[in-house]
Image (spheres, helix red, strand yellow):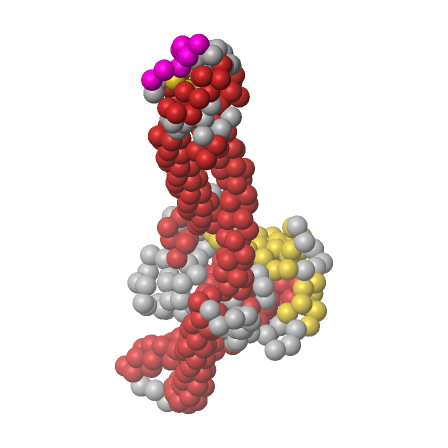
Amino acid sequence: MSFRTRLVIIIAGVFIAAGAALLTVQYLVVQSLFASAINTTAATCVPSMSITQISQEASATDPEGVSPFTGSSTLLYGDSSTGCAYFAETADAAGLPAATPMQTVTIDAVEGAVLQQSTFLADEVGGGLLLWSVVVLVAFTGVAAAIAFWLARRSLDRIGEVTAAARDISERDLGRRLDLPGPDDEIKELGDTIDGMLDRLQSAFTAQDRFVANASHELRTPLTTTRTALEIPLEQGAVPADLQANMQRALRATEQSERLITALLSLARARTGLDEVEPVELRTLIEDEVEDLGAGEIAVHANLRELTVDGDTVLLARAVRNLLENAIRHNVPDGELWVRCRRERGRAIIEVENTGAPITPATVELLTEPFYRGDASRTSTGPDGTGLGLAIVQSIAKTHGGEVRLRARKGGGLIAAIVLPL
């Protein structure tokens, strides 16, 4: 169950338990009061008329002085001060014969009638109280559940807002903040804590991107100087034959370092976001990259639709070029390459498919990690690539609000697609 459901159940359960306890105590107290009242009535509804009074009444009805009302065991009427002044009505209700001057009713019968009537009244009131207590408890159970649901929803709505806002913030827009309004309570404290964490993350990412950009710029100048110093003697033929192999190897290493630095600059730029966007015609951009790159012995098949997206032309061209370079570099001799551009559910799909060696699904999942090159050493860029090509493609796609999809091609090779919003 969700936290909200559990919270509703807990609040409603506590309410029901407290209501049941209150009604139970009330019922027991009422029963106790009735029992006490019955005992008091039984103790006070005894003959309170004196023998003299009884004798006088008997003499008035028996001139001969012979009266059946003798002793203290008979009673015609009760004492009004004890609450038994209307014994005749009580006797009628109990089914006893009415007391007349010539009829006697024993004290035991009177006491039994009073107790019977009092017990009947107590049972009726107690039974009704119990029934209505159950009805009220059931009714208020529904009310308690509704109130609990309302309280839980109101309490968790702000947490939902925090969750939604935190979910929308990514490394592309670390400048956003929750900035929760409202009282200074626990939820606002949570939002402020997340804002503080975002401040630290933004500082860390900014410092990292700044370091990469600065280091790349600082390294390009000495590498360009080194490459020039190696190329000129080789072109002039001023290098001895026994040193030419080493010079060529140093030149290739220098060129590889330059490509790596260029890739790092592209990656850093892609992660900083887009300052300005412009309409980009994808078909023209892809055709230019295919023509400029050249596939050599690789057969290229193109199926391109005219689609336009908003973005950075240089970055998108870099992403398409990286896909094409990757498809050519990891192809088989005399292989094939397919380039497609199509519309799908309101989005533009740039897809590059190539023949090549079989790739496992586990390897496909890691191809967008920086410096990962499949079966090659994970930390080595190798002689034919930087290991950053697909990582740059993914970064550029995310910067444009899109994504990269990779899947292994049946029979060997890779199908890589850039998905961009139109």
Task: Give coordinates of residue 344: x percent, y percent.
Answer: 65, 50
Q: Is residue 232 magenta?
A: no
Looking at the figure, which quarter contains the C terminus?
bottom right
Task: Give coordinates of residue 120: x percent, y percent.
Answer: 45, 23
Q: How many marks?
A: 0
Viewer-side residue, 131 vs 178: 131
Looking at the figure, which quarter contains the N terminus?
top left
Q: Please determine whether, in this image, residue 376 is positioned above or below residue 410.
A: below
Q: Residue at x 41, y 77 (%)?
A: 200
Q: Residue at x 37, y 63 (%)?
A: 372
Mostly what secondary structure, the magenta segment? loop
Which residues make up the magenta segment?
64-71
User: What is the residue that sits farthest to the left in this orientation?
Assistant: 242
Q: Please determine whether, in this image, residue 143 is positioned above or below residue 253.
A: above
* Residue 308 figure quarter: bottom right
Viewer-side residue, 69 vs 91: 69
Q: Is residue 66 magenta?
A: yes
